[in-house]
Every structure is written in C-alpha cells, then in structure tokens.
Image: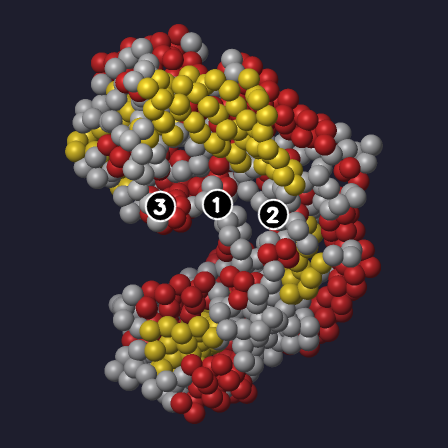
Amino acid sequence: MDQIYLDYNATTPIDPEVAAEMRPYLEEYFGNPSSMHSFGVKSREAVEKARARVAMLLNCLPQEIIFTSGGTESNNMALKGAAYALRSKGNHIIISAVEHPAVTEVVNYLGTKGFEISIAPVDESGMVDPEDIRNLLRPGTVLVSVMHANNEVGTIQPVKAIAAIVHQHGALLHTDAAQSAGKIPVDVQDLGVDLLSLAGHKLYAPKGIGALYIRKGVKIEKLIHGADHEQNLRAGTENVLEIAGLGKACELAFKRQEAYRVQTSALKKKFIEGLSAGLINFRLNGHPELALPNTVSVGFSNLNAQTILSAMPQLAASAGAACHTGDAGDSSVLGAMKVSPEYARGTIRFSLGYTTTVEEVDEALRIIVQTIRSLTPDASLTSPESGRAEAVKLTRFTHGLGCACKIRPADLEKVLAGLPPVTDPNVLVGAEKRDDAAVYKINDDLAIVQTVDFFTPVVDDPYTFGAIAAANSLSDVYAMGGQASFALNIAAFPVNRLPLDVLNEIVRGASDKAAEAGISILGGHSIEDNEPKFGMVVTGFVNPRSIVSNAGARPGDALVLTKPVGTGIISTATKMGLAKEETIREAEKVMMTLNKVSSELMLRRKVNACTDITGFGLVGHLHEMAAASGVDASIEYQRIPFISEVLSLALAGAIPGGTKANYNFALQWTDFGQLTRIEKYLVCDAQSSGGLLVSLPAQEAEIYIAALHENDIRSSVIGYITGKGTGLISVV
C-alpha cells in the first residue's frame, strides 16, 4: 500500500469535479471579470455563480460573501477591519485560548496598535464556556472571535450561545470556520455570527482561495486599497480560476455533508477502537461528542510526536497544527486544555477525508500500534534479536537534533539577564560575554578553562553520535585557546526504550575521540530519560595572558571560518529521509573533526577573538562576538563554505526549528541584504560541532589559512570587522 494520507485538516486534495470546473478558466475563459465585453462577462458569471454556491453552503445572501486568498486573509480582514471600524466605540477584543495563529497573531498585532486583548479559557476538552465570555465583556468590548471547530483536537465550540451573549452586549462575533465548513453544518443564520472565515484548501478546493462572510449591515474597514472590487472591500482583480473551484467545492460539500459525516464518523470510531485494542497508554484529546467527525487527536505517553512520525514514514499525519510542524515547543492548544506534558509532547493529529478507506484505516492502525510498541518499555527493540546497537536509528528517539535543541536565544537571553554579577577577581571569563567556556585564574601563569556541553542525537549511528558529542564538547576549550586535559561524561538514556548496547557504543565513540584529543575520561554522571542525550564536561588549562575570548575583535580584522556550514539542515534531512548517503557521510566527517589543529595553528598567529559555531548558527555566534567586542561585522554569503546539497535540502523543507528561531532572533540586529529566505536560514543554521570563527588581522589571516590548508582543513575568509559598533551584522 502506498503512503496513507491522514492529514486532511492540514489540506485536502483538489476534488476531480472541482478541477473540471476550474479547467475552462485556465485554458479558455481568461477575461477580466471587470471588463464589459463578452470575455469579461463570462468570467464575471463564474465569479457570481461561485459566490451563490458559497452562500448556499453558509445559508446567507450572495452579496454577504467576499472572496479572499484564504483563511488567513479572511481572519485578518474580519478582525482588523472590524476593530478599526469600531474603534470609536471601544478598543477591547476577546478571543479564545485555542485560536489558530491566523487569529492570535492578528490580535497580537492589534495589541501593538492600542487595542486591549482578553483570552477566554477552555476546559479540559478544549471548549469555551459562554459564561466566561460574558464575564470578560466590558463597556469597551467591540469584537469577539471564537473558532467554530478546533483544528488540532476537533472540539466544536458553542458559537450560537456565545453569539447571543455577545449581541446582548452590542459587540460583533467572528468565527473561524476553516475546519468546520464542509464537515458539519455551518449555517450563519443559526449560529448568529457577524463574520465568518472560510479556507478553500480545507474542503477540496485549491490553496490560495477563501471567503469571508460579512453579515448585511456590518461595516468593516478595507485593508487592500485600489479599485472597488468585491463590493469595494478588497481591491484586486478576482482570481476567477480558483473562485470557480471554491464555488464547486462548496456545492459538493453542501450535497455530501451528511454522507461525509456518516462515513468519517464510522472510520473515526473504528480508528479509536483499534487504538484501544492495540495500545494501553494513550489519551484522546478534545470533546468526546461535540467534535469534528474526522479528527482524532491522540497523545502517546512519554513519547515525542516527531519521534513517532519519523518512525512511521508510511503515514502522513501532523504533530499539532500543520503550520507549526518542525517548530519546537508544545502545542498552545493542548497547553490551554491543561494536557500534561507526558501526553502533550506525544500528541499526533490524525484527520480523515471522504476518500479515506477502511483498508487504509486498518493498515494505519497496524503501523501505529507496531510503532508505539517499538518505542515503549518492553518493546521489541530491547529483545536479543532486535536490540543490537547497529540496528537502532537514534534520531527517531528524539524530538530535535543536536545543538538545534538549545533553548532559544531570545529565551536564554532573558534567563541570563537575571543572573547576579560575578565579583570574584579570579574569574577571568564568565557568563557575561556569552563566551564559549569559563576561565578561572589559579596563579599568574595558570588558569582553568572549563566547559559543559551535551545534546540529543544528530546522527543515527550511536558510535558516531558519541564521537560528535565529544568533539563538540572539546571545541569550547579549543576556541578559548586552551589545552584540554580531561573530561567527564554526561549521559541521559531511555533504558526502557533502547538496549544498553547503544549507550556502550555512544561511550565508545566518545572515548575514541577523547583519545584522539589526547585526554582521559575520568567518570561522569548518567540519568534515565525519555530520549538519549550525551556530552562532556571538559577541563583544560590556559595561560591567563594567552586567553582567546570572543571579546577582542578589532576593526579591520578578517573573519576566518574553519568548517563548512549546514549540519543542522542535513541532520534534519536525514531524519526526514531526504539526504543522500554521501551527503550524510560528509556532514558526519565535518562534525567528528576536532578543532584541535585549527586552535593550535590559530595560537601561532596574532589572534584577537575566537568562538566556535554551534547551536546559534554562524550569524548568531558572530553577533555574540561582535557585541562582546563593541564592533560591527560584515560577511559575504558567496564566501561561506557549505556542505554539499545543503541548499537543495533546505529548499525541500529540511529546516530545523532551532534554525528558524535563530533567524527570527537575528532579525533585530542583522541586515540580510538581498538574500532569499532560504539563504537567510542557511547562515542561521543551528550547527552541531561546527568550526572555529577566528578574528585576526588580514595579513595574519592569509598565513593562518595557508597553514590550515596544509593540514587539509577547509577554511576561508568570510568577512571582516567593519568598525566600532553594537554587534550589528550585515550579510552581502
């Protein structure tokens, strides 16, 4: 059986009848619907026919329908448009705690424009109590937004009851019906809503088309200015092709609604019963009765959703909302429902469609049960037959990869800002400069340099993971110009999910890398955990007069990078099954390579500053260096060495959540110039065991690079320190 699609809440395929309806407007009827000639009239007829079909599905007047580019635009148009139009009456808006980001981000924006936002809580099933809405209403409340049905757990909200309360107060009610339209009746007259959003790709129409219902008499401000299209509410020539498709999809949804409900309800019941028969430890999220007939949100105990999904590539499903897939962090919906982390982090949303078959559900259940059993205690992986370390794929047992799992830089900055200042005069380097390691003075000629680093697997092979983790931990000492002396291991290990042979191989890989570095491992500490983690505390020594910190970069310095970039993207691509074997091997070699020789050669030159490139990415760590040094810097994108295939893998979607977080944090102090979004991600990619970034005079850089090349170390000048400043980075 081919891959089974169980992610219909994310998007639906285009129905064949919808595609047939669209085809003439792709191939034959191309006229502008605002034109008065026959070509334009034909297109206008299609638009109005579609408008009537959408109105039929929602039980409203055709003139109450405005076509948009999708659910997100409809939400923006409704919320901003109504808020601005009603501003003279008040500035208070209420939303529920389980809204889609297409609502929450809009009201967060409105909050920056002087509006006050209140959040209505939900119960453990994800349902809003209408009385909570009543209690939040106040004289300045002008708008309330509560979604019709939740996209993650399927709970259907009591919109009708909420509408009655809101209207008693004189405010407007908006509902996001992107997930409910076509699955359950969505009758705006019965619901009593003033504004309702619709997304085409949730009901077998194309992506990029949607609609907004605006009750007759409700006034909103237009957001897109130009001509007077769409009743002078949305300027721009109508997308006739996709509007025709949306209209047909709404017509089909109206006809099939009851049959869809019966079919998907039966499959949902079968799905839940199959899970109950095969598994003992899971939690169903959402209301047991008042929920979408096609949505099954399941939390698996003490597992990670991404780990589960990676272990069953035959199934297409989502860990939470599709728009957040790949992002780190727990679901805000499950958090609002107070689902315990034990189940929240292992929650997967399975959503069925009208084309889903009984055979597909049966096969999906077989795969799910088999996968969950393999990832839980007393699983087959711990048996003598399948418990060999070489049979284990480590990246399937973790939520994230390597240094990409670091706490987000913006959050870490907040935590570190609260630390008290260090007053010990023997502390030569502490946390204040965000340097790589701590340095403590023993006497005038001797100081201890110490670091600790550990992370989740970045590769599948246990031995290779141990070697990479060791190389990564040692790197901080090398970046400070220190000489490593000994190490302690740090291990977290799921003893009930993985055989101890795996941990033996991890430790062996680390031991071999420590031997290569010329140091001993003297012990360590281990704990049981839900996922494997490994690293080291490394202790070394340095002459206090020879410390290389990240705070000494000077204007005019050249910036030398000693390893290529891209390990975060390749690790993610490996977990997704996208990376070629030769690309994986190249990335592993980069990460396993010690920075020992690069450090030793660096110390022979007049070096001003150094840092190693790890979880915060090239741009992030350069910013830390520049800010600590009181300078600004510029790097040239074309000079940055990348591991093979990184760009194509990034274009394929292999972007770690840590890389995205790095990019978002970097926006406040980085000018990315003309880089594309993907290129911006590349320079922000969260690295594991990356190279050294060395700041030294330009003439010294030439000699340094020549020496690196003699030792087969791939390196290049990637930029310069441009002058005094505050840590601003430009990428050209």
Considering depth in this image, is 534 or 456 the residue closer to the camera?
A: 534
Q: Quadrant of the C terminus?
A: top left
Task: Tell me how far mark 1 sits from mark 2, CA to CA.
Answer: 12 Å
Quick check: 663 above or below 228? above
Q: Is tag 1's residue or tag 2's residue first in the polypeptide sequence?
A: 2
Q: Is label 1 in contact with label 3 (beta carbons under 8 Å)?
A: no
Q: Position of residue 28 (x, y in %)?
A: 47, 60
Q: Nearer the viewer, mark 1 or mark 3?
A: 3
What colour scheme does the image use? secondary structure
Q: Is residue 211 left or right of residue 87?
A: right
Q: Residue furthest top?
A: 710
Quick check: 317 above or below 338? above
Crowding at dot 1, Cα within 10 Å, few <14 / some 14-19 / many 20+, comes out as many
Q: Which residue is mark 1?
A: 657
Q: Is tag 1's residue or tag 3's residue first in the polypeptide sequence?
A: 3
Q: Position of residue 57 (x, y in %)?
A: 56, 78
Task: Tell me how far mark 2 sits from mark 3, CA to CA.
Answer: 34 Å
Quick check: 213 above or below 243? below
Q: Is tag 2's residue or tag 3's residue first in the polypeptide sequence?
A: 2
**Residue at the location (67% across, 30% down)?**
503
Q: Is label 1 in contact with label 2 (beta carbons under 8 Å)?
A: no
SS state under label 2: helix
**Residue at the location (24% across, 27% down)?**
553
Q: Which residue is mark 3?
A: 419
| Amino acid of disc 1 | Gly
Q: Quadrant of residue 708?
A: top left
**Residue at the location (66% across, 51% down)?**
302
Q: Position of residue 351 (x, y in %)?
A: 65, 61
Q: Is residue 214 left or right of residue 128?
A: left
